[in-house]
Image (cartoon, rainbow, N blue to C red):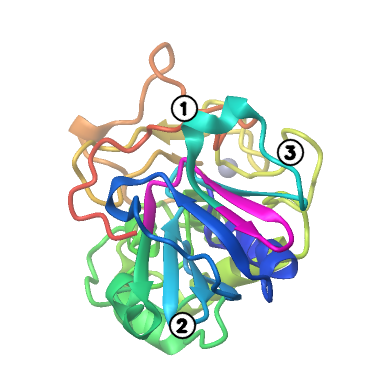
Amino acid sequence: MPEGDSVWKAARRMREQLVGRTVVRSDFRVPQHATADLSGREITAFDSCGKHMLTRFSGGLTLHTHFEMDGAWQVVGQGKVLPRSFDDEVRLVLSTDGPTAYALRMPVLELVETAREDEVVGHLGPDLLGPSWDEDLAVERLLREPDRPVVEALLDQRNLAGIGNLWAVETCYLRGHSPWTPVRAVDLHATVQLTRRMMRHSLEHPGQVTTGDTRRGRTHWVYGRAERPCRRCGTPVQFRDSVTGTPYSRETWWCPRCQPGPFPSLSERPTRPGSRRGVNEESFGSRTTRLSGRAGYAR
Ligand SMILES: [Zn+2]
């Protein structure tokens, strides 16, 4: 699943290849913009904002995209096209006087006036990877609901923008807190500083590594490691599935020994061995329909 750092890196890549180019032809394959035409406009910016991407065009138009679980941009060189096997996945073709960009499987794809971008990203808290990151404001927002489990509060993009499940889960492990520790009991400054440090490191390095070990299967402490021994203490890593219908409830992994604190109530007990085991380290991010309960979910 693309997290803020992945979107940031995608924006950097797109910027390098497409800013300054003029759109020759645009082909929207989403109903609400079927007749939109961007031809003649220059691409002036690709910016990430949390997990959102803003592509700006001359004439004051912005394309807002959100990858959610599975969206992606693909760029091919001038004169080339994406293989036809991708046809079903294409939501937008942006042909320029240079490369051609394809938005694939993008669940959110909408045009807004650049002056009104706030309507699509104004709800977001400070962007961990943005130029105007504001740690104090992020902490203030996290504390608005002091009893809320820290893992959920970190995932709520209205508090701070860019954190996905991987960073939230690994941050809780590294700070030694059960994911269900209320935010009031957590050193939030140290917590968000750690998350931001890891995410910024990720911008300049491949993969999303929290252990410092880039070898396959060694990149994370607990994320995707249900029932495997904790790398520090050997206790089996616990797993709990997301709770359907609950905003910000995600699959969660934790070490009960290294992360003392409250655990889910009896009805929300971790999945037991023999039933679902959670994703494997090797397969995370490959599934497409994890979230069934989206009520109140602010992207
Ligand atoms: Zn442990």
Q: Distance between the residues labelled 1 and 3?
A: 17 Å
* Residue appearing at x 31%, y 81% in the figure: 116
Q: Is residue 259 visible?
A: no
Mark before the other along the chain sequence, 2 or 3: 2
- Look at 48% across and 79% down and name the residue there: 189
Give the class, few, some or many, for how many residues have Cα within 10 Å of label 3's Cα (few <14, many ≥20). Answer: some
Q: Which of marks 2 and 3 is in front?
A: 2
Q: Which amino acid type is marked by label 1?
A: Gly
Mark 3 — residue? 218
Specify the quadrant that holds the C terminus. Answer: bottom left
Q: Residue beneath label 2, please?
A: 59
Q: Position of residue 103 (x, y in %)?
A: 53, 49
Q: Where is residue 212 in the image (x, y as percent from the top left)?
A: 77, 53
Q: What element carries label 3?
A: loop
> Looking at the image, is mark 1 or mark 2 earlier in the sequence?
2
In the rendered structure, which segment of residues is drawn in magenta?
94-109
Residue type at the position of mark 2: Gly
Q: Residue at x 42, y 88 (%)?
A: 136
Q: How far apart are marks 2 and 3 (CA)?
A: 48 Å
Q: Looking at mark 2, is its residue's CB closer than 8 Å to ligand 1?
A: no
